[in-house]
Image (cartoon, grey):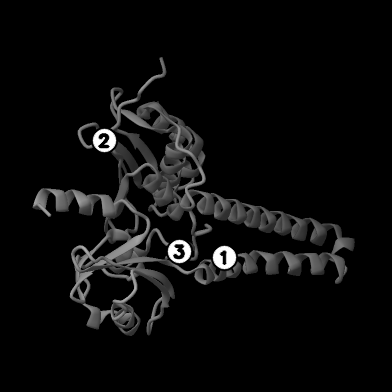
């Protein structure tokens, strides 16, 4: 394959949500971004002997008599992964598709749902069985806590459903022309009160001319989530800066907050991943953001420095809006 075609092929593979590993003579020659995330590596080629999934991968690659074979990969550490092996007879490649197992997703969701449900049960028991409902002050206090827990549970379930639909490709993308500066101003207006509590300055550097071709509601969700996180994980008297570049069809949200440790950057978009448990959240927001960007065929990149801040950059494919006749 010519190098130019190979490079284009790699770009396409990196846009996929499914992990892809390509082997030749049992040597890994390519690993896409999704597979790097699943295997917790940032290497362009995977050294099997250094992988916690070494034994499972080795056993899978020894299957050469079947064109297609499926099995679950297990390792010394890490989550079980579903793997599909494709043996190519044209070029002696072995291609492995990777994705998280259903059991892993179900287990994570059950774990996260269990905590607010346990809190709701405790509060209901306190009110119903232990007589707190008879005391006006106690009743008001526990009902307020119950309201908060039910709201948290509802949000968690709604975000789980959104993430499930996005990753299943069940939500269509309705492309339209977006005046992005106006969208940023509207997001700032909604989040001004939250920013004011920490005396954070919201700065819109997007030009009037910058236009995105994307799904308005979904990109608005991405933008608001990134701005809200930038406020939430920022320092007192900090800044949140939104900028955009027409040449790369990209926009970024930058904060002056606490930053993310380098080892944690590959984990940021995982479901339920939260690095500061003192700051409230479901741990699903950035997973949804990445799924929306993936749905658009785009990329999201992170650059961060401890105690200096973090920047999320969203890059979308350049498109022309075709209007109906």
**Label whose residue precedes the other's in the sequence (2 or 1):** 1
Near mark 3 (Cα within 10 A), the count class, few <14, some 14-19 or many ≥20, is some
Q: Would you place residue 26 above or below residue 154 in this image? A: below
Q: Which residue is mark 3?
A: 274
Question: Where residue 67 appears, x then y in whole percent?
Answer: 33, 69
Pick the quarter of the image with the C terminus. Answer: top left
Find residue 109 and name its label: 1
In front of the other: label 2 or label 3?
2
Find residue 306 and name its label: none
Please indicate, yes or no, whether residue 242 appears anywhere in the rendered image. yes
**Label whose residue precedes the other's in the sequence (2 or 3):** 2
Camera-side residue of 198 and 285: 285
Q: Would you place residue 229 above or below residue 40 in this image? A: above
Q: Give me the residue at 52% from left, 66% from top.
A: 105
Question: Where residue 149 appears, x then y in whole percent?
Answer: 67, 58
Q: Give me the residue at 38% from left, 82% from top.
A: 75
Q: Would you place residue 122 above or below residue 1 in this image? A: below
Question: Where residue 72 appears, x then y in whole percent?
Answer: 43, 76
Horizontally, residue 197 falls left or right of residue 85, namely right
Q: Which residue is mark 2?
A: 249
Camera-side residue of 61 and 132: 61
Camera-side residue of 195 and 30: 30
């Amino acid at each position: 394959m010519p190098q130019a075609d190979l490079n284009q092929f790699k770009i396409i593979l990196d846009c996929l949500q499914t992990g892809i590993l390509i082997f030749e003579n049992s040597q890994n020659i390519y690993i896409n971004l999704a597979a790097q995330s699943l295997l917790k590596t940032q290497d362009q080629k995977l050294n099997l002997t250094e992988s916690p999934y070494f034994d499972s991968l080795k056993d899978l690659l020894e299957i050469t008599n079947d064109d297609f074979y499926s099995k679950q990969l297990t390792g010394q550490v890490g989550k079980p992964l579903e793997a599909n092996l494709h043996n190519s007879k044209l070029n002696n490649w072995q291609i492995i598709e990777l994705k998280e197992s259903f059991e892993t997703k179900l287990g994570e969701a059950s774990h996260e749902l269990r905590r607010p449900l346990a809190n709701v049960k405790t509060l209901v028991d306190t009110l119903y069985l232990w007589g707190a409902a008879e005391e006006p002050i106690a009743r008001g206090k526990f009902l307020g806590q119950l309201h908060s827990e039910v709201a948290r549970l509802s949000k968690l379930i709604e975000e789980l459903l959104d993430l499930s639909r996005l990753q299943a490709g069940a939500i269509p993308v309705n492309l339209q022309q977006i005046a992005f500066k106006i969208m940023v101003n509207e997001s700032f207006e909604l989040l001004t009160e939250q920013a004011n509590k920490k005396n954070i300055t919201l700065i819109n550097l997007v030009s009037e001319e910058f236009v995105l071709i994307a799904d308005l509601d979904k990109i608005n969700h991405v933008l608001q989530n990134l701005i809200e996180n930038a406020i939430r994980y920022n320092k007192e008297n900090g800044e949140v800066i939104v900028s955009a570049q027409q040449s790369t069809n990209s926009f970024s949200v930058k904060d002056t907050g606490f930053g993310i440790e380098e080892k944690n950057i590959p984990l940021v978009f995982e479901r339920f991943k939260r690095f500061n448990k003192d700051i409230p959240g479901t741990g699903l927001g950035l997973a949804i953001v990445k799924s929306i960007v993936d749905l658009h065929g785009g990329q999201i990149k992170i650059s961060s420095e401890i105690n200096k801040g973090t920047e999320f950059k969203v890059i979308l494919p350049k498109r022309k809006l075709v209007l109906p006749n």
